[in-house]
Amino acid sequence: PQLLALLVKEGADKQNTAVTEAVKVELATTAAVLLEAKFPYTPPNTFGLLSLPAFVEEMEADESKISAGNTMLAPIAEAKSDKVETVDEEEEKPSAIAIAREMEEESCKVLCSWLGVDTRRMVAAQALAVMYRTIANGSGVDNVVNGAISLTTPLDEMTKALSETKLTALPHFDFINALLESIRDICLYKKKLAASALEGAFKAMSTVMPRLEVALASFPKTHPAERRSAKGACSSIRHTLVEAFLSWLHHPDAANLLTFQVVFLHNGLMSTPFFFTITTIGEAQGDLEYLIITVCQAINQLDRYSKSTTNRIISGLTRVAAACHEDIQPLANELVLPLLPAMLDGSQWGKFLRLRTEAVATVLVGCAESEDFRMENHPWISDFISFLLDPVVSSENVHSFMILCGLIRAERKLLLHVASYCMANPQTVTQTLHEPLARWPLYEEDVELVIVTLELLEALLSVNTLRLSVDVDVIYATILQLSDNAASEGLDAISIVCKQVMTALESQQ
């Protein structure tokens, strides 16, 4: 409270020159760091709010990373000791609690006022999310109803600053990004917020992309270094804006505001398709056809983009398909067919190949959920199944088998289709699923492949028609020998899965 009182005393006076600006900024930073230590909080991964199939694990790195939050505070939060003492508020005197709460709210007012001061607004934008959490921890629902500063004012003031800031110099871009980070963190905290504050935040966020485009055009090509810096800042802002909007979308009090989502999408597209990640708002009731067509247009011109941008488009497709479920099926061919040639001819490998594999698989899961979708009418499905069972790039065997396991576990329709494919191509079971289990000795890098092969074999042999078409006794004997060998070498993970598969085969006799 004493430090906050000092912040209030010195920070409220914008004319006093006895204390330098640098000292005032450092004072606010110190107060925010101490409050962060008192009320530690690790925000969830924003993109983790979106549901994805279990087999998806290769999302574009920039989008899948856990949000670091305000850079000013992150290192301190990571370094704090497990031994930080917490105060038992029940033991504090009521007067001390009241004084502390008053100082917190007064400090919040000071920081809000700093948003209009060029030399202080950056630290204010970063510290307000921490101040908000501090006040929210000690505030009840009544505070929102009564219009107290505790929960509404910080968001309102940052929204106002976001709308009014002119993007005429590089520091302005950093300020916009800091505001969006704090808006994101406030929404992620999921404390009750007034609907008017959330609506205002949305309206401010929806203006950011058009303003970035105009601002970028104001940096002349005759100053390439400055223009490159502005482009980099735009990229950071776009990414933070995606996170902020997703956080806003998933805030409990935004449930009645989802009609804004398509408006945001239309205004959110810039020259780069980074914003296709936003189309995952198809989880809500929205213009799904527009969302899917937008991605189709990008998929059909991937050769125009850099590898990193292409990966972002593919990641966006995966999220769109996961969010749209069966609604993806009318345009499945348009989404998948442009991706398959590079997968089947071996020209893609590593992360680039895995991203495409997961995207096609997620589209296929959505298609399978639709009763109207007939797999036999789409030859690309058999091509994709063949690719998963025998990848052109052998190093992708484990990933491909994991995808296939995920597919057949997700929808029985897919399990039956894969089983039918195996019956039509009997060498698949022999060469791909049986013979690898007969190899010994195993090397460390083989363990994961053997385990996923066993899991895949167990699932497929649960289909009567396929089981009757193969020699189950021979397969059983191979797995029994593998189990004994694995147990003798201490490979418990393999031995356990072997026993699980043998038990399943015995029960199906």
Image (spheres, rainbow, N blue to C red):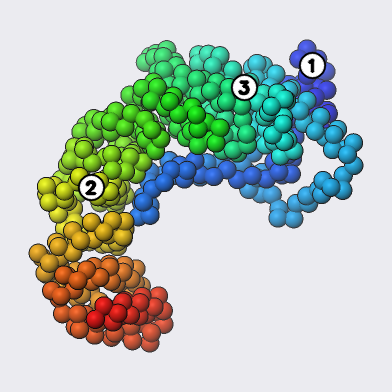
Q: Work out which quarter of the rendered image holds the C terminus and state it.
A: bottom left
Q: Pinpoint residue 62: horizontal percent, then vertical percent.
A: 43, 40
Q: Earlier in the sequence, mark 2 or mark 1?
A: 1
Check contact, mark 1 vs mark 3: CB within 8 A.
Answer: no
Label 3 to label 2: alpha-carbon separation: 47 Å
Q: Pinpoint residue 312: horizontal percent, then vertical percent.
A: 34, 38
Q: Which mark is residue 403?
A: none
Please name the residue that numbered disc 3 is placed on: 156
Amino acid type for the residue under numbered disc 1? Asp
Between 412 and 167, the one lying in front of the other is 412
Q: Which mark is residue 13?
A: 1
Q: Earlier in the sequence, mark 1 or mark 3?
A: 1
Q: Earlier in the sequence, mark 3 or mark 2?
A: 3
- State whether residue 260 is above or below residue 428: above
Q: Give the side of residue 244 with respect to residue 9, left or right.
A: left
Q: Which of the 4 image quarters holds residue 222?
A: top left
Label 1 to label 3: alpha-carbon separation: 22 Å
> Which residue: 38% across, 54% down?
54
Q: Pinpoint residue 72: horizontal percent, then vertical percent.
A: 63, 36
Please name the residue that numbered disc 2 is placed on: 371
Residue 432 appears in the picture as rendered: yes
Q: Which of the 4 image quarters holds residue 16?
A: top right
